[in-house]
Image: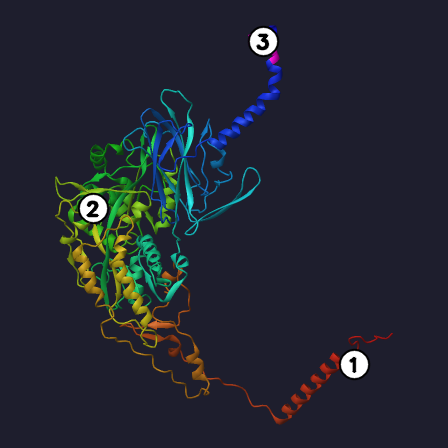
Amino acid sequence: MRRRHRTSSSSASVGSTVTRRRPRLFPALCMVVGVLVLVLAPSQLAGGDRRVANADAPVAYTATAAPVDGLLDGGTVKVNVKSNDGYYVYQGFVQVCRTGVTYQPSPGIQYDADARPNGPNCPLAPVSSSADPGVSDTNMINSAASADGDTIPIRVGVGSVNWTDNTGVARNLTCDSTHPCELVAEILGGPKDGSTQPEWVPFQQQITFNDSNPLASCGGAAVGALNSSGSDALLDAWTKWTLALCKQPGQKGAVTKASFVGEGTAVQEFDAGALDLAYTSAGNDPTVGLDPTPTKRPFVAVPIALGAETVGIGNGYGSNGKKVPYPTIDATPSELASLVASGQFTPSDVQGSMTTRNPDLSPYFFAANPTMQVGVPSGRSASTWFLSKYLSTVAPSSWIVPPVGAAGPDAGKPRGVFNDFGTASPDFTLLTTYTGRPALRQSLFTITSNSFLLGGVYVVSDATTSIAEGLTPLAVQVTPDGPFVAPTPDSMAAAVPEMTPNSDGMLQPPASPTVADAYPLTYVEYAMVPAQPLVDVTCTPRTSSQALLTTWLDYLTGPGQQQLVDGLAPLTPALQEQAKAAIAKVGKTPNTCKPPAKPTSPTTAPAAAPARASSVPVVAVSGPSTGSGAANAVASGSSSATASVGKGGEVRPIAANVPIPPYKGSRSPSPLMTVLALVGVVALISLAVRYSSGSRGLGVGRGADPGP
């Protein structure tokens, strides 16, 4: 009895006895309980809702991620998190990790080891230089509780990375068209009443990729594949179209190869005969002047999509102690003209009027950074011409060089109409000029990755580039007291009826639009294709290439309309009818190709000379561009330039036009020299035979006694 009483007693002697025995029993008990928890605990929910420790507890937050399929290298995925009633969401961390893992929740100050950078599943370094290593958001409590939730953007990549985890094991992560990866967002949240401690609960979403070089995914180029080029605004769309078409039943290989060197260069190379098609919205319109050379090639313009020129705003403003991406900003045509014409020297009254209408622009209208405040593209493009024509027409008093000392003698001059910001006069040296999306992406990353740098960064670009690089296109007020219109599929379609055709039948936006709910800088994207049949350098029809051209155009204007990327809008019914009529004309114009004349030999040349000239290889009209396009080819081969293209598209072999000097030779050998040469040959053969037989007459032979 006394023993039982002491066991249940709270006396010091009993307490000390229990304490001495615990080291032998308690760890084992904890181990058993831990194993049972791991085995019996329910796995994570697979949907967007994530819970706290108990799987039966109320939902703590809801998360979504978009886009998640067909991502390209450097593409942005946005993870949106909203806290639910009764819970706080404090912070989050998003990264790309191995798929096939059920990532576990974890209480405490750090999330579970299965998702720690440089751990077993998640690398510290990204798979690509265009991707983020991981993005953290340390202040989500207020934004996650708002109606819009908290959005964490992360750039993902296509590639592979190796690392050694913290236990010394070699690891690898590959993200590409055949290897999906896992987007893992570790979110720290807990009940507002403090009934349980905050816990890291992961949200995970599998993401898939498209190769930046779709020809590899298509198993190479199809026989007779077409060579194409255009602005890199169409790079994502071309990639998506190519991958979708090459997976169609019966299709073998990619239909087109492409180099995205700029619209102006593409049109010029098409006219020179180096391309089978070019993507453009103005073609050879002389007022736009994309091709400054006199040589022009007969073509058919096939509409393939609607595009738009934009001024996008990037970086972010301060809200609840963190940087938040800008919503749509409204601007009048005059404000838009001042912003693009003056850059950081935009007048204070313009900044004030825009800020009054858009409070998020306060207190930092511009981001205080030297990299970029207003960026404009370099290179000939129709969209630049449309923008400058529009602003010059509707807001001439604002479309001027800023009247400041830094502008020098050009201060106050009209900006005028031009197709290239890089060569415009007066120049745009007071703004930041960029060439191509990679350069723009790097400049923006330098700014947006600084969580303490607030304020707007404004960029002139096409809508596709603007959206892909995380910029929000400004909405423009078309008519006084009218609505502010952003580029959407509906507002872009509404702009088409007011367009007028140029001399080639290509629709152009009006300089002074009047449709209040139509986006004013909408244009039609065309495929510029040969009116004459495709032929090689001998004027032989390229029948397989001609068939592929029809297949490609039928796809772009048909099923491809459902494969458009953000920033492009589908053709209106009227434009679809125009596309069908245009495709029917492709290759139907009589061929004017003239076969190259057979080279004639100089009278002093030997008979073998003409064979040398004709044996020099020549490239076909469809061969890869040897101009600037070849250096930037996405997936085209390389070849020596051995053919020149004449007016009308005929191809002349360069080798045939280069005179080959006659071979002068040497004097014929005398009979005596011939006899001596034969004697020498016989002597050499005799020596070789004796050496191989091991004869002592040659010195030390194989197996012979060398002697003293």
Across the whole image, how many numbered discs are drawn on residues?
Answer: 3
Secondary element at image label 3: helix
Residue marked by disc 1: 695
Q: Quadrant of the rendered structure where residue 136 is?
A: top left
Above or below, comparing residue 684 to residue 171 in the picture:
below
- Closer to the camera: disc 2 or disc 1? 1
Q: Quadrant of the rendered structure where residue 516 is?
A: top left
- Residue type at mark 3: give it: Arg
Q: Which mark is residue 4?
A: 3
Secondary element at image label 2: loop
Image: magenta residue range: 6-17
* Extreme-front residue of the structure: 1
Asked whether 249 or 96 is in front, the reply is: 249
Above or below, comparing residue 404 to residue 216 in the picture:
above
User: For mark 3, does the 10 Å Cα neighbourhood hold few (<14), some (14 to 19), or many (20 or more) residues?
Assistant: few
Rounded to the nearest angstrom, the CA distance separating label 3 from label 2 is 97 Å
- The percent position of residue 444, horizontal first and vertical second, equals 36, 43
Give the mark nearest the N terminus, 3 or 1. 3
- The percent position of residue 632, horizontal first and vertical second, equals 39, 58
Based on the picture, tell me whether residue 18 belongs to the magenta stretch: no
Based on the picture, tell me whether residue 7 belongs to the magenta stretch: yes
Give the mark nearest the N terminus, 2 or 1. 2
Residue marked by disc 2: 399
Asked whether 469 or 104 is in front, the reply is: 104
**Magenta span main SS:** helix
Asked whether 527 or 51 is in front, the reply is: 51
Residue 286 in sight? no
